Image (cartoon, rainbow, N blue to C red):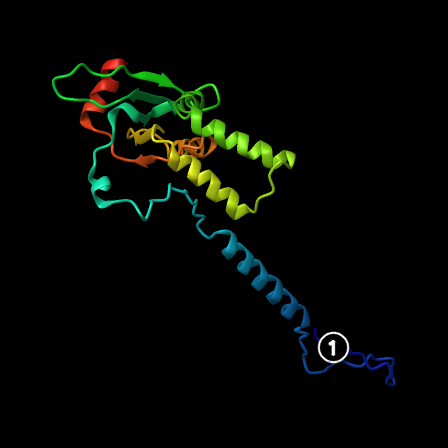
Amino acid sequence: MAEIIENDSGKKGGKKNKLKKTSTHVDMTPMVDLACLLLTFFMLTTAFSKAKVMEITMPEKDKKEDKKEDETKVRADLTLNVILGADDKIFWYAGAIEKDKPLPELHVTNYGKDGIRKILLKRNENVFKQIFELREKIKKGELILSNDTIDSRIKAIKKGDKHAPIILIKAEDKAKYRNLVDIIDEMAITNISKYAVVEITPEEKELILNSK
């Protein structure tokens, strides 16, 4: 700020002296504080604006699995096809669409415990029951196990059931990304260990179109 000094000494005749101006001095201290605040603000807003990535946990592949077993077709009697549609609808059918055979019955359900979850639990009842009983014993203190041991036990239960369902997850063009996240969550909730995200087939699109 400019510093102005007024000379109080008067002159004869009662005339006032002219004001004397000194050199201008600008105090930059407040500007330094403002610069620090702006720097902090931009650093924080940059961190907040970073893209967020949602991790989707897919089932682990057994490293000891035989190559011939990899090439084996999915058993139709264990397969449940789940198709994510528009408006949060879920279409599902059991088995596979085979040439020169009657088309499977297509069902419609929704997300939640009384929808697709109930269907998955019924298909995976044996595995879910065993894992539930294991967790209850641990909760009551009947079994004292480390987290690694618990994970190993659960994996063994899932792998040991030869009749566990195989879920093929597909999506229509109008399905939302959130629908995929929700159905993957349902796989975890119902302890489904065998599932895959695959492309919807033209036959399935036609099956859905004819059901509307």
Which residue is rendered at x = 18% and y = 14% of the image? 102
| Residue on which disc 1 sits | 3
Q: Quadrant of residue 35?
A: bottom right
The spot of residue 79 in percent (x, y) is 29, 26
Q: Secondary structure at mark 1?
A: loop
Question: In this image, 67 relative to 175: left or right?
Answer: left
Q: Position of residue 45 (x, y in %)?
A: 53, 54
Residue at horizontal 37 percent and vertical 22 percent from the top: 89
Is 63 located above or below residue 93 in the figure?
below
Q: Could you tell me which residue is drawn at 20 percent across and 42 percent down?
A: 68
Q: Residue at x 29, y 28 (%)?
A: 172
Quadrant in which residue 123 is drawn: top left
Left or right: 50 with respect to 180?
Answer: right
**7 versus 185 height, above or below:** below
For the C terminus, the image quarter is: top left
Q: Name the quarter where the N terminus is drawn.
A: bottom right
Q: Is residue 206 above or below residue 132?
A: above
State which quadrant residue 43 falls in. bottom right
Q: Where residue 170 sits: x, y (%)? A: 30, 31
Crowding around mark 1 (Cα neighbors within 10 Å: few <14, some 14 to 19, many 20+) is few
Residue 193 at x, y percent in the picture: 39, 35
Q: Nearer the viewer, residue 162 or 124?
A: 162
Left or right of 36, for residue 76: left
